[in-house]
């Protein structure tokens, strides 16, 4: 079975390379679900020396004040005996460092590239992998040392900034806390213990490391702490003896330093009985074993997170659409398919499968009848106007039975006003159809993928609606004009005939057009006009549906399809130019999906082999 820590290291590197690294985020990521060990301690607590002892190499920058100003994600990989040791940085892919002095310099340089040559800190981590036959498989995160005061060149918030950064790591339930405390200081004042106790009050996730045991005042020892009597944690305390500054200055190698450390615990009477679980070598082995145990316990949760994330990534990739076809035929086919999808969505709005079509019916059932009802014929059928038109229509020869020409002129002038509501109904339906086009465009996911095609399809659909509106306007107004051009004779034949049309024939022509007679003419004309309005109330919707709604369902994009067939490959490609952000997003999601599927396969294989 592949070593679990190696597998997790591999997944963590892939997560980081793809930006799926949530070390300073509350968002759940695969990285967050993978256990790791965060190294916490105050400045000058011996953190760097502990890490170097675990690795067995001098590779960390040293100096006064805050030296670690960015998190360092350190992944150790055990390789075959006899193989040459080397290191790799994630920000320098394919470059191997065999000189660990150069590794130290690169850590400093990369820190300066992010923070400048100031003493400020940054939450952006440095990722370093070390391959050596002398290490155990392990992932450690070295964090800036906790401090109580800001020094010159640092902002006043530096103390809180560092604490917030440390908390962002150790508050995560999958984080193992390696709390480094110097033995020559009162444990009650230990920064590492204080913050660890706050985030892990039961000590379930905290491993205590006691440094500088050899530097304690004479007559004092750390036995009570190491035996868990002074400050008890779930896991036994581990004491280490790091190299002194003199050893570092003399370049005492790690092999000699580890040998001297073993000798110290074995030869010191106070610690002899604890020697088997003291020292940096034991610390490294214990951390590796513990980390693997924790990873095993977290596998079900990791599998669940991976499965959920894969489903979410697949869903978003589906929403973003497939990549563009390479050849002209494929592009034309893709465009046609997208247009058909849009056209189908548009039809679904009209047919009631999606909302919107009901507004068209509302125009016919409410707006048009209300507009016809609001028509005012007072001007056309006023006594003065009736007298004027009938008199003018008679000319020099007074009418004998009924003022036919006067009737025609009065009816025509009244019916002409119906053109207004008819025209308004055409425009109202056009506006609603345009709204449905925009809705259908916004609901066609593939059109979001290709802004150029979205603009063209929208413009082509609106242009078609404009043509249909003009045809509908002509047909609809023609219905009104037909009513003006031909009067229904039967209506007038049914009217009661009077013997004396206008009174005594011996009266003058002006007396014959008395008010009673003119009012009767006005009432007759209004009855006829109302009859025509009732007819047009049903005829106008039929005309509009036939010329606009039905035609939009049938041939909304016909002209666009004709133009597509004539387009050169370059123009077709331009239509399928994606939004760069969408392309970038799809590419990132595809890589992330590949990572999660690979992680799923590997973790499932480990789970099944348990």
Image (spheres, rainbow, N blue to C red):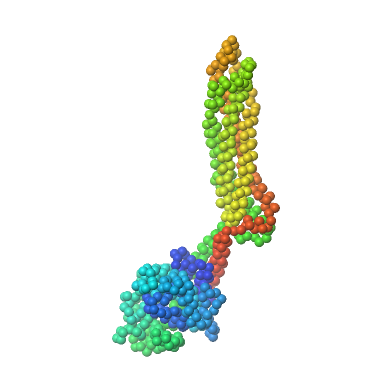
**Hey, which residue is sitting farthest top in the picture?**
506
Q: Is residue 164 left or right of residue 348?
A: left
Q: Tell me where residue 71 appears, x and y as whole percent.
A: 44, 73
Q: In which quarter of the image is residue 64?
A: bottom left
Q: Please, is residue 107 above or below residue 397 in the view?
A: below
Quick one: 341 or 49, which is closer to the camera?
A: 49
Percent x, y of residue 124: 46, 70
Residue 404 visible in the displayed image = yes
Which residue occupies the extreme right position in the image?
566
Can residue 294 be seen from the camera position used here? no
Q: Which of 544 and 170 is in front in this view?
A: 544
- Total residue callouts: 0
Q: Quadrant of residue 159?
A: bottom left
Q: Position of residue 197 (x, y in %)?
A: 35, 71
Toward the front, the furthest residue is: 396
Percent x, y of residue 302: 49, 68
Of residue 114 and residue 80, the one placed in the foreground of this image is: 114
Is residue 4 shown above or below 324?
A: below
- At horizontal 61% and vertical 61% (from top left) the residue drawn is 323
Which residue lies at the image location 59% right of the left edge and 22% below the top edge?
A: 389
Residue beneath the point at 66% across and 61% down:
326
Identify the residue shown where x is 59% and y is 56%: 450
């Amino acid at each position: 079975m592949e070593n679990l820590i190696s597998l997790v290291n591999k997944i963590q590197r892939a997560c980081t390379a793809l930006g799926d690294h949530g070390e300073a985020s509350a968002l759940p990521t695969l990285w967050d679900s993978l256990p790791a060990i965060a190294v916490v301690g105050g400045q000058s607590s011996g953190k760097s020396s502990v890490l170097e002892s675990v690795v067995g190499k001098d590779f960390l920058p040293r100096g006064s004040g805050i030296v670690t100003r960015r998190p360092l994600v350190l992944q150790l990989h055990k390789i075959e005996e006899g193989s040459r040791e080397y290191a790799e940085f994630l920000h320098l892919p394919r470059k191997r460092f065999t000189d660990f002095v150069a590794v130290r310099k690169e850590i400093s340089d990369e820190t300066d590239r992010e923070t400048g040559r100031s003493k400020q800190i940054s939450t952006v981590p440095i990722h370093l992998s070390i391959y050596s036959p002398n290490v155990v498989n392990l992932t450690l995160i070295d964090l800036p040392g906790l401090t109580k005061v800001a020094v010159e060149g640092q902002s006043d918030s530096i103390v809180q900034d560092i604490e917030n950064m440390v908390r962002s790591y150790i508050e995560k339930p999958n984080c193992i806390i390696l709390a480094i405390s110097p033995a020559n200081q009162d444990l009650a004042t230990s920064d590492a213990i204080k913050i660890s106790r706050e985030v892990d009050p039961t000590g379930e996730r905290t491993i205590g490391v006691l440094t500088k045991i050899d530097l304690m005042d004479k007559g004092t020892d750390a036995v009570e702490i190491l035996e868990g009597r002074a400050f008890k944690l779930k896991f036994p305390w581990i004491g280490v003896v790091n190299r002194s500054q003199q050893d570092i200055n003399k370049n005492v190698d790690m092999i000699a330093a580890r040998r001297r450390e073993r000798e110290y615990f074995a030869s010191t009477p106070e610690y002899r009985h604890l020697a088997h679980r003291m020292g940096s070598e034991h610390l490294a082995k214990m951390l590796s074993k513990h980390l693997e145990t924790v990873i095993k316990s977290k596998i079900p949760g990791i599998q669940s997170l991976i499965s959920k994330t894969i489903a979410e990534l697949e869903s978003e990739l589906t929403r973003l659409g497939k990549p563009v076809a390479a050849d002209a035929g494929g592009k034309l086919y893709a465009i046609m398919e997208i247009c058909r999808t849009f056209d189908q969505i548009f039809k679904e709005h009209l047919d009631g499968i999606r909302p919107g079509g009901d507004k068209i019916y509302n125009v016919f059932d409410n707006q048009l009848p209300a507009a016809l009802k609001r028509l005012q014929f007072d001007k056309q059928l006023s006594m003065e106007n009736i007298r004027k038109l009938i008199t003018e229509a008679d000319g020099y020869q007074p009418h004998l039975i009924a003022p036919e020409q006067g009737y025609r002129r009065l009816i025509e002038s009244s019916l002409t006003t119906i053109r207004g509501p008819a025209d308004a109904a055409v425009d109202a339906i056009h506006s609603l159809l345009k709204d449905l086009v925009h809705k259908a465009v916004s609901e066609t996911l593939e059109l979001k993928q290709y802004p150029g095609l979205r603009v063209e399809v929208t413009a082509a659909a609106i242009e078609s609606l404009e043509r249909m509106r003009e045809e509908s306007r002509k047909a609809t107004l023609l219905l009104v004009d037909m009513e003006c051009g031909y009067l229904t004779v039967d209506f007038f034949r049914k009217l009661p005939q009077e013997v004396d049309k206008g009174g005594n024939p011996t009266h003058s022509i002006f007396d014959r057009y008395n008010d009673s007679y003119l009012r009767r003419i006005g009432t007759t004309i209004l009855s006829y006009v109302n009859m025509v309005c009732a007819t047009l109330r049903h005829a106008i919707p039929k005309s509009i549906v036939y010329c606009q709604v039905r035609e939009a369902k049938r041939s909304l994009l016909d002209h666009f399809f004709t133009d597509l067939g004539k387009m050169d490959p370059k123009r077709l490609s331009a239509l399928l130019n994606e939004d760069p952000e969408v392309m970038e997003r799809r590419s990132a999601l595809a890589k992330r999906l590949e990572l999660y599927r690979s992680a799923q396969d590997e973790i499932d294989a480990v789970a099944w082999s348990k």
